Image (cartoon, grey):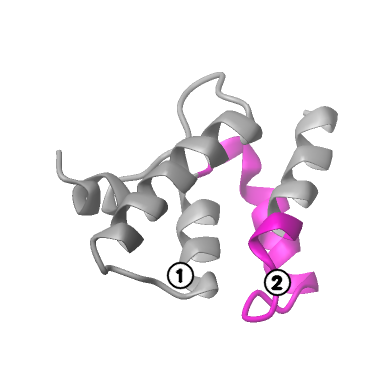
Amino acid sequence: LTLLGKYELFEMEENESIQTMFGRFQTIINGLSFLGRTYDNFDHIEKLLCSLPRKWRPQVTALKASKNLEKLPLEELIRLLKVHEMEL
């Protein structure tokens, strides 16, 4: 798979932690940016939220309702997801 393909098809793996998933994601976006393919923060946030498994749906819905995703830093999203991960 190309880097672009990996980005397009990115999904959280079964029993993967948010930290590990985000590490994989960052490797892909760093590689893409090295190749001149850049996305804005909002694209990354949408991609990450869509990559989460079904059990995360309520959290994703809550985040979309409560946060301005256009302005949410990626690190903040990851922090919020880690907090929720402990509850799961």
Q: Which residue is most to the front?
A: 34
Give the side of residue 71 with respect to residue 38, left or right: right
Measured Cα–Cα span from mark 2 to mark 1: 11 Å
The picture places residue 37, in percent across and down from the top left corner, at 28, 68
Mark 2 Cα-neighbour bin, 10 Å: few <14, some 14–19, many ≥20: few
Where is the N terminus found, in terms of image quarters? top left
Q: Are marks 2 and 1 in contact (CB under 8 Å)?
A: no
The picture places residue 2, in percent across and down from the top left corner, at 15, 45
Q: Earlier in the sequence, mark 2 or mark 1?
A: 1
Q: Find disc 2 in the rendering and name its residue.
A: 72
Q: In the depicted view, which residue is nearer to us: 82 or 23?
A: 23
* Residue type at the position of mark 2: Leu
Rendered residue at 62%/48% (across/down): 57
The picture places residue 39, in percent across and down from the top left corner, at 39, 72
Magenta segment:
52-76
Q: Secondary structure at mark 2?
A: loop
Give the side of residue 11 with respect to residue 84, left or right: left
In the displayed structure, 10 sits above or below 17; it is below
Rendered residue at 42%/42% (across/down): 27
Q: In the depicted view, which residue is nearer to us: 52 or 5?
A: 5
Mark 1 Cα-neighbour bin, 10 Å: few <14, some 14–19, many ≥20: few
Rendered residue at 41%/40% (across/down): 11
Label at residue 43 = 1
The picture places residue 33, in percent across and down from the top left corner, at 34, 62
Camera sees residue 71:
yes
